[in-house]
Image (spheres, coloured by chain):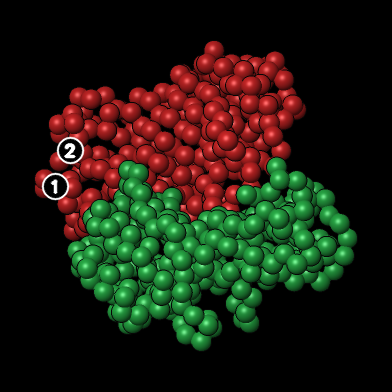
Chain colours: A green, B red
Amino acid sequence: MRYFLEIAYDGTRFHGWQTQPNALSVQEVLEDCLSKVLRQPISTTGSGRTDTGVHASQQFAHFDVAQELNPEHMVYRFNRLLPDDIVAKNLYLVTDEAHARFDAFERTYHYHITLAKNPFTRYYATYLPRSVDVEQMNEAATVLLRYEDFTTFSKVKGDTKHYRCNIYEAVWRQQGDELVFTIRANRFLRGMVRLVVGTLLDVGRGKLTVTDFERIVAGQDRSKASGAAPSEGLYLAKVTYPEHIFKTSPKTNPL
Amino acid sequence: MRYFLEIAYDGTRFHGWQTQPNALSVQEVLEDCLSKVLRQPISTTGSGRTDTGVHASQQFAHFDVAQELNPEHMVYRFNRLLPDDIVAKNLYLVTDEAHARFDAFERTYHYHITLAKNPFTRYYATYLPRSVDVEQMNEAATVLLRYEDFTTFSKVKGDTKHYRCNIYEAVWRQQGDELVFTIRANRFLRGMVRLVVGTLLDVGRGKLTVTDFERIVAGQDRSKASGAAPSEGLYLAKVTYPEHIFKTSPKTNPL
């Protein structure tokens, strides 16, 4: 049987999603927990990697298990064993070929900024001591919707065949002292959102014009992007799958 | 010149507000910062103590300084030196006799509970794995408004002359998975809010009836209160002063 597990995590103390030697990852802690509760070695495949320190308010991973599971009971048992910073939210029975990474056709990231120093959000939002021009940042963000190649905002080469992404939404919304960037696309490149945010913030600070920003995107030259925005503000917020992969009733599906 | 400094802090890593030997307090870190920025030894008097791990979304402390200060500039400089978990919010010039503790005529505390395991609020709200009867908890909370002696909910003896408090408001409000208790009074006894919350939660769990709760309050016997609720959910949220102690314009006053 194949299952999709929906989780959320505070990325602060993890070296990202993916298991790696000599560093604690979300995937490793999760697989330890699932293997203990299910009394068999469980390996998971995530919808995608999140980098060191990056959070997820919604992430999915699939795994295979011999027996049928009671979702509600299992979520309860996973949460009892998981540490406080990883939460199991739901468990869905899916078709045998469903794949958490390849079937995800849309991902949404949020980037949280606080414009007032706030003792309660220091791990959950990036503090900007100076105000930025949100209107200019939004004008620059719309440029992203007109391009397909994002080589400019790709951190590493070699692990992807191409740099094309379809960006459906890229917008900054301000509410009081809180500024949130939402970016939605079919796929993202490594480090892409933090490089996009870092470069848009330079537009907001007046260091770059919207025209500069467009030239940087069009140039496909990584060295022209600004520095990456810090990880604590970034959240994987939503991963979307086609309905037909879920075997459970539509009411309990995450769509 | 006497000033009131308005601050907020994440209490997680502090042994409470008050300076003490061999343990890090908010007051100690704050006084270090003020003394450095103002280049003179500064000692502060807080509106009241908060216990180990308790947060403050609004706290006030007064201090005396030789010269007149530019509030906006000073707040900026304090924040540059203060750690991420203490924030200076405002600075107010007050009358020479104004006293952060004795002039405060009303304090409000909030207690935050989350009914769903949440990786992002583990230091900021107490997680209750089972639901509670909020209606019963609110009925019991109104009992508090009819009593004046709260010996039952006082953690220590000896440091107060009497156990009388006038409680003006005591109410639970639920919004989705978040449950917030607001309690407002002229004064609070040591550990009082956490003992009140712990005992009200036992009403919510059905371990105590509203009648039991009233008997416990009336009994003035500390051993009858339930265990204290954990510190991470508790916030000093508001401290109220009479308008006449502020020398700056009413517009900039915290009232």
Q: Within 10 angstroms of label 2, few (less than 14), some, or many (20 or more) residues? A: many
The residue at which mark 2 appears reads as: B93
Extreme residue in the right direction: A67
Q: Which of B163 and A94 is in front in this view?
A: A94
- Which structural element holds mark 2? strand
Task: Say if mark 1 contacts mark 2, CB within 8 Å.
Answer: yes
Q: What amino acid does circle 1 point to?
A: Leu
Q: What amino acid does circle 2 point to?
A: Leu
Q: Which percent across, then down, holds residue A152?
A: 37, 77
Residue shown at 50% from the left, 58% from the top: A108
Residue shown at 64% from the left, 61% from the top: A60
Q: Along the horizontal axis of the image, is B113 left or right of A133? A: right
Q: Along the horizontal axis of the image, is A127 left or right of A17? A: left
Q: Which percent across, then down, holds residue B129?
A: 69, 42
Q: Which chain carries label 2?
A: B
Q: Within 10 angstroms of label 1, few (less than 14), some, or many (20 or more) residues? A: some
Q: Is residue A207 above or below residue A183?
A: below
Q: Along the horizontal axis of the image, is A74 left or right of A251? A: right
Q: Mark 1 lies on which chain?
A: B
Whole-angstrom CA distance, mark 1 to mark 2, is 8 Å
Residue shown at 53% from the left, 24% from the top: B171
Say which quadrant the N terminus of chain A sits in.
Answer: bottom right
Q: Nearer the viewer, residue A243 or A118?
A: A243
- Which structural element holds mark 1? loop
Which numbered tag is attached to residue B69?
1
Q: In this view, does B187 lie above or below B146?
A: below
Q: Can residue A152 be seen in this view?
A: yes
Q: Along the horizontal axis of the image, is B163 left or right of A32? A: left
Q: Which percent across, then down, holds residue B133?
A: 68, 26
